[in-house]
Image (spheres, rainbow, N blue to C red):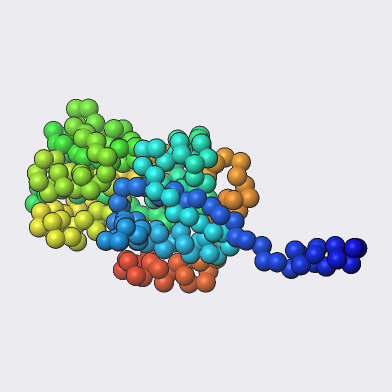
Amino acid sequence: MKLKSLAAALMLMAAPVAAQEVKVGIAAEPYPPFASPDAAGNWVGWEVEIINAVCAAAEMQCVITPVAWDGIIPALTAGQIDAIMASMSITPERMQTIDFSDKYYNTPTVIATAKGAGIAPTAEGLAGKIIGVQVATIHEAYVNKHFAGTAAEVKVYQTQDEANQDLAAGRIDATQADSIALDAFIASESGAACCEIAGAVADDPEVLGLGVGVGLRQGEDELKAKFNAGIAKIREDGTYDKITAGYFASSIYGE
C-alpha cells in the first residue's frame, strides 16, 4: 500500500501544472486599432495580441472578457474580472481604487477637428466650440478641467466612434482622444474626407496619467508581478516590437 501511495504521489508531482486562468477585461465598445470584433465576432487588434503575448509569457491562461467601459472598474473590484487591459491610463484618481502594472504603452493626447477649421488645441482655440469626448475617460476629465465652462461646451458619448461620427457630420467642432485612436479615424474613408488632427493638448500627468497599464485589484501583488514579468519578457525578446510593427509605423511604448 505504501509503494502504491508513493507511486501515486510521484505521478501527481510529475503532472504538468495548469496555467493560471485570468479573466482579462476589455471594453465592450470597439476601440480600433487596439481592440474590436471582426466579422466573425472575434476580438482582434494590437491590444488583443499584446494581451495574448503577455499572458503566454507569464504562463497564464487568459480569457478575454468584454465589459462595458463605464462599468469595467466596478467589475474588477467586484471580482467579475481579474485584470483590465483596455487602454486604461495610470492616473492618481484611479489608483485610489485599483492598482496598476508597469506601463505597456504611452501615446500623446490629441484633438481632431474639421479640415481647415483652424482650431488650436487650447482653451482659447476651443472658446465657443463644442468638443466631444468618451464618457468616463481621462479625456472627459481633461476637457472638463481645461476647456469646459466659458471656453467650450462638452458633449459626452458612450463610445469614441460616436464622437467621431458627429465630428464628421459637423454636429461637434472637435473631439479629444488618444493619438493612435484618432489617427486610425483620420486614416479611414470617412475621417480622411472631413477631418484632421489639430495638435496635441498640453500635458497634465495628474489627469492624463503616466501611460497605459494593466488594472488590478489592490493587494494582488502576485498577479501584478506576473503581468510585469510578462510585459518585460515580450519587450526583451522582440515580441512587443513584432506585434507593434503590424499596426503602427513606429514604437508606441513611449519614454
Q: Which residue is drawn at 21% across and 56% down?
A: 185
Of residues 69 and 170, the one nearer the viewer is: 69
Q: Residue furthest top?
A: 149
Q: Which residue lies furthest to the front in this view?
A: 1
Is residue 228 among the parts visible in the rendering? no
| Relative horizontal placement of residue 94, taking residue 20 as reference (left or right) | left
Quarter of the figure that contains the N terminus? bottom right
Residue 22 placement (x, y as % from top left): 53, 52
Is residue 76 among the parts visible in the rendering? yes
The picture quadrant where one finds residue 70 is top left
Quarter of the figure that contains the C terminus? bottom left
| Relative horizontal placement of residue 29, taking residue 1 as reference (left or right) | left
Of residues 154 and 123, the one nearer the viewer is: 154
Q: Residue furthest right?
A: 2
Q: Which residue is drawn at 14% across and 40% down?
A: 172
| Relative horizontal placement of residue 153, taking residue 222 as reference (left or right) | left
From this view, report whether residue 245 is shown above or below residue 187: below
Q: Which residue is drawn at 59% across and 56% down?
A: 20
Residue 192 placement (x, y as % from top left): 13, 59
Q: Which residue is drawn at 70% across and 66% down?
A: 15
Question: What number of labels is visible?
Answer: 0
Residue 203 placement (x, y as % from top left): 34, 45
The picture quadrant where one finds residue 68 is top left
Residue 175 placement (x, y as % from top left): 21, 44
